[in-house]
Structure formats: C-alpha cells, structure tokens
Image (cartoon, helix red, strand yellow):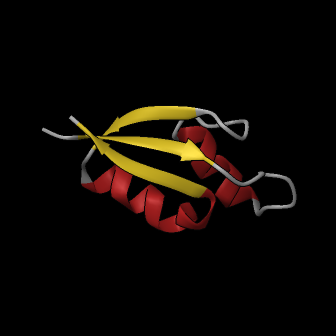
C-alpha cells in the first residue's frame, strides 16, 4: 500500500474551526511540518477539505 507525504504550506491562522481540526487530525500544526499517512479514502477526504493549504506527494 502506498503512503502520502502531506506537508502544511499555508498558515492555520484565520481558518475555520473545521479546517483547523482537519489539519490537527492529520498531525499538522505548524507551517513546514509534514506527516506520512496511508493512501486511503479517509486521508483523501481530509486532503480534499484543506488541499489548498497542503502539498501532497506519494511515497513508497
């Protein structure tokens, strides 16, 4: 199964509470932080909600 490297590239300041909660559920709190998550439907849904703040790359 493939994994995704998800990096926060835009600030959470001034965002909606749901967007901040989604970023925190991915383990992202500060700009430049990244996390490795499995490529599944739950992760893809979170990325779809706040994709404009993220940089996503596929990792093996």
| Residue in the picture at 66% in, 58% down | 19
Count all numbered tags in the image, as a single digit: 0
Coordinates of residue 13 in the picture (x, y in percent): 85, 53
Residue occupying the point 75% across, 57% down: 17
Query: Closer to the camera, 34 or 44?
Result: 34
18 or 28, nearer to the observer: 28
Q: Quadrant of residue 27?
A: top right
Residue at (72, 41) in percent of width and height: 31
Quadrant location of the N terminus in the rendered image: top left
Q: Position of residue 35 (x, y in %)?
A: 48, 32
Up-down relation of residue 57 to residue 35 (above or below): below
At 35% from the left and 58% from the top, the residue drawn is 44
Whether residue 42 sits left or right of residue 50 in the image: it is left
Q: Can you say which quadrant of the picture contains the C terminus?
A: top left
- Looking at the image, which residue sits at the far left? 1
**Residue nearest the observer in this picture, 7 or 26:** 7
């Amino acid at each position: 199964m493939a994994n995704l490297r998800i990096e926060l590239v835009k600030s959470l300041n001034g965002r909606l509470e749901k967007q901040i909660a989604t970023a925190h559920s991915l383990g992202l709190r500060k700009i430049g932080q990244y996390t490795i998550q499995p490529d599944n439907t739950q992760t893809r849904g979170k990325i779809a909600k706040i994709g404009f703040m993220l940089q996503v790359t596929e990792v093996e």
